[in-house]
Amino acid sequence: MSKVMSLYLSETLDVSSLKNIVYDLSVKLQPMSDEFDAIAVRGMSGSLVGPQIAMNLDKQLIIVRKETSHSCSKVEGYFSNNTRYIIVDDFIGTGATVRSIIDNIQESCHVSMYKATCVGLAMYKQSLYGVSKFTQELVPDAKVVVARWCD
């Protein structure tokens, strides 16, 4: 019997769970796919889930690196003027990660003279609190999509 050797990444390292996450969020994001151009992710978990959802929906990918990254650039990916993006994250709690993603993308766009707007949030890991009021205050007009086992 095999077992995933990670508490934090267990849902995304287990192939069956990962397929379910990607399928579920792809299906839930499809009806609003005309409203965004890209999927924004951060961290290892997001890097496992985000590219597959982006491919399923034929969307571009934006990767926002954590502060401890060894990369020269905090933000890498697709931008055009007025890029609309959805943040896909495992756990949306205090809003700190969402704030960091938005701030880093805005900073990157400012340097390159583009404009980008967060238009939605998608969560795929179990949360005791759902999407917090802090996150809703950060992106008040954003649509929120939650994977079925996180409802």
Image: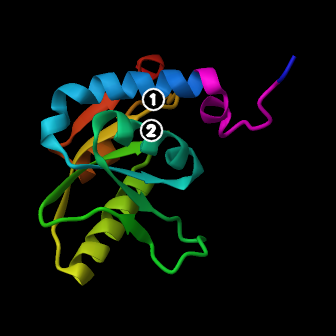
Task: Tell me the amino acid under the disc marked 2.
Answer: Gln
Quarter of the image that includes the N terminus: top right
What residue is shown with label 1?
Answer: 22
Please tell me the numbered disc located at residue 56.
Answer: none
What residue is shown with label 2?
Answer: 52
Q: CA distance from mark 1 to mark 2?
A: 7 Å
Left or right placement of residue 30 versus residue 17 in this view: left
Which mark is first along the chain, 2 or 1? 1
User: Which residues fall within the magenta stretch?
Assistant: 3-16
Q: Are marks 1 and 2 in contact (CB under 8 Å)?
A: yes
Task: Tell me the amino acid under the disc marked 1.
Answer: Val
Q: Residue at x 30, y 76 (%)?
A: 107
Query: In front here: 119 or 47?
Result: 47
Residue 29 pos. (x, y %):
27, 30
Is residue 4 a member of the stretch shown in magenta?
yes
Give the answer, above or below, for where 105 lies relative to 14: below
Q: Is residue 62 visible?
A: yes
Give the structural element (helix, strand or loop) at label 1: helix
